[in-house]
Amino acid sequence: MAETMVNKEQQPVEVSTVERTRSGQVYSPRFDIVETDNELILFGDLPGVSAESLDIQYENNVLTIYGKVEPRHENLNFLYGEYGIGDFYRQFTIGETIDSSKISAELHNGVLTLHLPKTDAVKPRRIEIKTV
Amino acid sequence: MLATRWQPRSIWSEMNRLREEMERAFGGNGLRQFDTYVYPPLNLWEDDNNLYVEAELPGFELSDIEIFVNGDNQLVLKGERKPPEVEGGTWHRQERGYGAFNRMVELPEHVDPDKVTAEFKNGVLTVTMPKREDAKPRRIEVKAN
């Protein structure tokens, strides 16, 4: 398990093309997204990705997840080959205003859990009703 | 009367043709196409001494995975993945599956069930199954006179 804080400053929005210098298959990982009052939580399946080989960026409301998977067995003849191995890449456009300095991520047994806290301005506020 | 009935090309046959072409275009990496209800997909390979089975099982705990070798050529994998615990909230996307699986595969070689080992790292399970002595390839010495 590892903690990765991501807070990238303004950079050219070339993330997707920059990373595609590697050859090989790229897969789109499956994600669950849940929104609570205070944050968005993302759960993603990234089997074979270690914390060091995972890159997460958030800028201009776009969340980019890129997990590098080193080839585990090259030049092998599979007797059963039912799935392919490759990098994981996915982008989400996040509509809610996110406090990017408080984004946190952890990776455990191939599952990425991302917490994207909302800024206070967009958190729902309960309106007190005064009786007169 | 015609022996085979002529059918106008329906939208469905067009769709099927399109799907087949897509599968050919994107699935043509030499891997066997697996049915979605077979879980988990496995990769199996061998060297002279061992058979190896690998499966991607993200979000499982090793304690939730059971591995059996029945007889000497059946591997059974069992496990259960629990949904994440989030109180309240609205789900915008649910693409990951949960629940229990149970898969049995026939092994192409006889293995020694007592020496089977398994490793689980970053959500990838690798089972190493040593072949039985009589299943190992034997090098035949050729004597030169």
Image: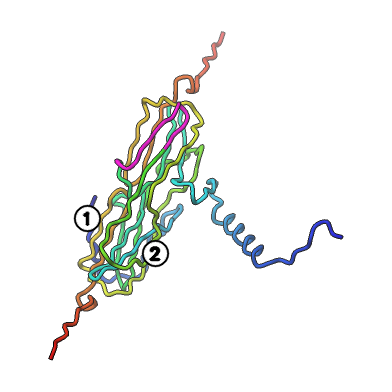
Residue at mark 1: chain:
A
Q: Is residue A48 visible?
A: no
Instruction: Please state the horizontal and vertical placement of residue B45, each as a whole percent of the image.
Output: 47, 36
Extreme residue in the front direction = A132
Q: Does residue A41 sit above or below A98 in this rendering?
A: above
Q: In the displayed structure, does residue B89 sit left or right of residue B26? A: left
User: Depth check: B58 or A74 in front?
Assistant: B58
Q: Residue at x 34, y 61 (%)?
A: A65
Residue A129 counted in the magenta span = no
Which one is closest to the eye, mark 1 or mark 2?
1
Instruction: Please state the horizontal and vertical placement of residue A19, each as a whole percent of the image.
Output: 38, 60
- Three-letter amino acid code at disc 1? Glu
Q: Residue at x 17, y 85 (%)?
A: A129
| Label located before the other in sequence (1 or 2) | 1
Q: Quarter of the image holding residue A35?
A: bottom left
- Regarding mark 1 in the picture, which secondary structure is present there? strand
Badge 2 is on which residue?
A16
Q: Quarter of the image holding residue A103?
A: bottom left
Chief secondary structure of the magenta span? Answer: strand
Q: Is residue A89 visible?
A: yes
Q: Residues within 10 Å of mark 2 (few under 14, many from 20)?
A: some
Task: Using the image, tell me which numbered label, if any, was put on residue A3.
Answer: 1
User: Depth check: A84 or B94 in front?
Assistant: B94
- Regarding mark 2 in the picture, which secondary structure is present there? helix
Q: Residue at x 38, y 61 (%)?
A: B94
Q: Which residues are magenta?
A: B63-76
